[in-house]
Amino acid sequence: MEQLNLAIHPVDLVIIIAYLVGIVALGCWAGLRRRNITGGKGYFLADKALTWPIIGLALFSTNISTIHLVSLAQEGYVNGLAYGNFEWMAAFTLIALALFFAPFYIRSNVATLPDFLEKRYSRASRDWLAIISIISAVFIHIGFSLYTGAVVLRGLFDINIMVSIIGIAILTGLYTIIGGLLAVVLTESIQTIVLIIGAVCITFIAYTKLGGWSELAANVDPVKLTVLRSADDPSGLPWYSVFLGYPVIGLWYWCADQTIVQRVLGAKDENHARVGPLFAGFIKILPVFIFVLPGLLCLGLINKGTLPAELTDSADTYAFMISHLLPIGLKGIVAAALLAALMSTVSGALNSIATLFSYDIYRRWRPETSERKLVVIGRIVTFVAMIAAIVWSPFVSHFQSIFQGITAIICYIAPPITVVFVCGVFWRQASSMGSIITLLSGSAMGFVVFLLDWFKEHTGWNIPPMMATFYLFVICLIIMVFVSLLRPHRHTEESEKLVWKNPLESFYGEAWSGIGNFKLLSALLFVTMVVLYVVFG
């Protein structure tokens, strides 16, 4: 990666340091001010007191990391708006979370999603999902985020990658260990605001400097302004792979991944658990315009001759724009936004790992463990996970594109988990034997496909990850149905309540009146996304 050698002006340095000190202090204060933080629900689920604005902002902040700020700008520069599909399609799966999954999570009063699987299926399913969830949190959510943030800080300020990884990991781990989920969601809410301000600043300045949409259209290939592409498009993301593959990874990520859904598990009640994800769905409209579009604006500015044609590596797109477009002061704000995106994702993943290990693994072997000791165990696990992520982070450089790399790994993890959760809430006959066989065989197949893709220069593997995830999903679905019919499920009184008799039943729950009605919000979000796809398709 080319060094841009951006000197740190004292004003920018003060802003960055003030942000770091402030966010760590806020996180520690949020945890320490509660005397009952030693209780499990207080530490892991914020006493189940989270309201819809906090849930929505925290969902968005945990999802958005430095990977998005940097890699989506890179994709925008190279492929235009195509990779914006990963942001806009998320709105549809957030609707699914609000309508079909969140009610069962709240009614079953679970602390983790593996806990939910045990109530619906069996202990074996819980164990396997807990292990997979911990692995994915360390290697996907934390590892990729730490590395991407370190690369950007190296590009901007010439800071050694390992120094950045260790430094940010320590600061984030500090307030996460002390404060638990309450500290995580409070800091995430602040970080979301900082992140959006920074991203909006660089987008607005680039858009204004270029001269508006008409000038953008005149200085880039028109196809780059669309999100749905043909099979021969160089982006490698044809429209059919988006509509077939994204629901598989989206349902796992937004509806069945502990790191993300833990914010919903801490909801005050069912309506807050429903409206929070819908609020996040509306916020997810923004990333195409403030994360992907800047990369395309950068291309337009270079093609127009407004910016010098010095960008030799597309990975430097975001750092290039910061160094050439932002005045003193704003550079510090945007750098703080990068740190905000990184720290929020890492803190959320660390807290979910602590929760998973404490409730789903440790307490199984020592059921008599007190809530106070669970918190201590959780803090120890948070520290160990942080060390593991630091060790793994440098290996992320294996991937040609960080965003496409993280997408590929998710594509190979998601299919069996998506099948088990979807069948679990919609099909009464989905059995415990079908669940564990699907999880084990699907994970094994995903690992094999991952190896084939990792060594594709030797194996000749050429199936795009988004299509591979769809094929794996179909195979896992067949396995689930076949085994469930062969070995029927014996429902308990509890598991009977965790299956919709029909999908429309989800609309019958108690809802707030007016604009806060989850049914109205779901319809509004759905129509909004359809219109956006019609306009930009």
Image (cartoon, helix red, strand yellow):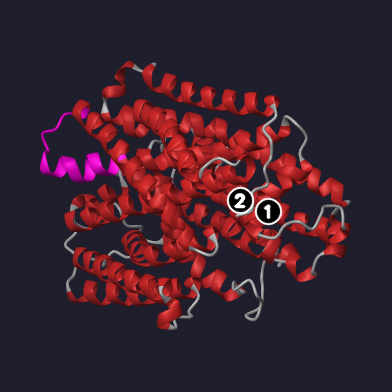
Q: Does residue 168 appear in the picture of this structure?
A: yes
> Which class describes the residues within 10 Å of circle 2: few (<14), some (14-19), or many (20+)?
many
Q: Compared to 126, does 401 lie above or below?
A: below
Residue flagged by tag 1: what amino acid is it?
A: Thr
| Residue 216, percent from left and from top | 83, 59
Q: Compared to 435, does 181 lie above or below?
A: above
Q: Main secondary structure of the magenta part?
A: helix
Q: Please tell me which residue is depicted at 76% across the width and 54% down the height of the picture.
A: 298
Q: Please tell me which residue is depicted at 32% across the width and 53% down the height of the picture.
A: 135
> Which class describes the residues within 10 Å of circle 1: few (<14), some (14-19), or many (20+)?
many
| Residue 296, percent from left and from top | 74, 58
Mark toward the start of the polypeptide (1 vs 2): 2
Per the image, label 2 sits on a secondary structure element best described as helix
Instruction: Please tell me whether residue 356 belongs to the stretch shown in magenta.
Output: yes
Q: Nearer the viewer, residue 212 or 53?
A: 212
Write down the quadrant of residue 361 in the picture: top left
The image's mark for residue 117 is: none
The quarter of the picture where the N terminus appears is: bottom right
Q: Do the CB atoms of the residues marked 1 and 2 lie less than 8 Å apart?
A: yes
Judging by the rendered image, the residue that carries numbered circle 2 is: 70
Q: Nearer the viewer, residue 105 or 383?
A: 383
Q: Please tell me which residue is depicted at 45% across the width and 43% down the height of the picture.
A: 162
| Residue 153, percent from left and from top | 58, 42
Q: Nearer the viewer, residue 295 or 258?
A: 295
Write down the quadrant of residue 11 in the picture: top right
Q: CA distance from mark 1 to mark 2?
A: 7 Å
Q: Is residue 535 left or right of residue 235?
A: right
Judging by the rendered image, the residue that carries numbered circle 1 is: 317
Residue flagged by tag 2: what amino acid is it?
A: Val
Magenta segment, which residues? 354-371
The quarter of the picture where the C terminus appears is: bottom right
